[in-house]
Amino acid sequence: MTFTTMQFDILTYIERYQDKFLDVQTISDKTHYSVEDVEATLKQLVSEGLLDEKQQVTTKAYTLLEPYKVKKAIFMAAGFGSRMVPLTLSIPKPLIKVNGKRIIETLLDAVLAAGIEDISIFRGYQAEAFDMLLSKYPMIKFIENPTYNEANNIGSALKFKDLMTNAYVLESDLVLYNPELIRKYELHTNYIGKYVNYTNDWCFDVEDEIIRRVNSAGGENCYHMYGISYWDEKAAQEMVTDIPSVFEMEGGHQRYFDEVALTYCKDNFEVYIRPVYEGDIIEIDTFGELQDIDDSYKI
């Protein structure tokens, strides 16, 4: 069986809460599909033998889902975070607390809740500070990037390029409010993004669910980009050669990891958008933005 995106999203949402009976309205609210679409899809999943009459995920469904299981999470956490000075003079940005919780912990907790325990953090600036995470997250593997100040995050990508199969790659300075964005299963290679009328930040132009172009200067009627992506086996294998190829280009060390598949080698990839919504996730770029959402930083 070849899953549609809707079938996959609804089936995996039900699987996530297998111990609960989810009514149609709840599934609709959480997956952002209409009630009518959810009802029709549930009937399809039952007729295909993927759900039983009590809406339990069947053995057949688990067999079909297995190739889509996320195996690992890779965190990019090597950079300085210059726009968060003065805080980042003494601590890496991912370790800054927002309303009492470290930024990276919002992501780590979601990864573990999805059953993903193969976790690597690529660190550079004040690398030893990340050791504080081990008491709560002893499964973390740290990988050093001593040249973090000589290249953009494509430098870290050179070191994790062989680890990307069935893996999330996450920027570590995103505050995740909706842990359901991190899932046990992923259908396609994808990036998350929020549809907006306008943004002056990185964004995607999307057609038929496929990211056609990334714009670093912003745009209109586009998807605001957030730095969480997933890489299936085919795309991961392609990145093994494409990341070094881009890095070796003139000025390549100043490129970003995301530009490999979305700009310089985009003909080699089919990257889907995975929509997120208001309140799911935020990116704090500056100290002023941090003050706006956490009063404890106001002077």
Image (cartoon, rainbow, N blue to C red):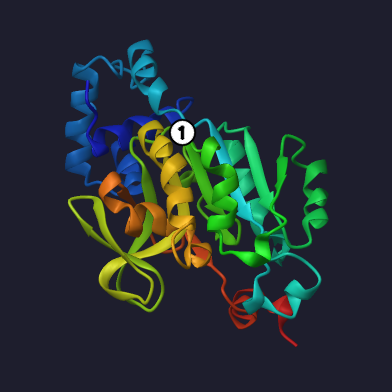
Would you say 114 lies left or right of 28 here?
A: right
Q: Residue at x 57, y 71 (%)?
A: 284
Residue 230 at x, y = what percent?
A: 43, 43
According to the picture, the residue beneath numbered tag 1 turns out to be 166
Residue 123 at x, y = what percent?
A: 70, 53
Q: Residue at x 33, y 38 (%)?
A: 188
Q: Residue at x 56, y 59 (%)?
A: 153
Residue 165 at x, y = what percent?
A: 47, 33
Q: Quadrant of residue 80?
A: bottom right
Which of 45 and 154 lies nearest the eye of the viewer? 154
Which of 217 and 19 lies nearest the eye of the viewer? 217
Q: Residue at x 81, y 71 (%)?
A: 90
Q: Quadrant of the N terminus?
A: top left
Can residue 238 be seen in the rendering of this structure? yes
Residue 297 at x, y = what percent?
A: 72, 79
Q: Quadrant of residue 231?
A: top left
Q: Quadrant of residue 128?
A: bottom right
Local SS, label 1: loop
| Residue at the limit of the structure toward the top, as seen here | 59
Above or below 4: residue 107: below
Which of 220 and 211 lies nearest the eye of the viewer? 211
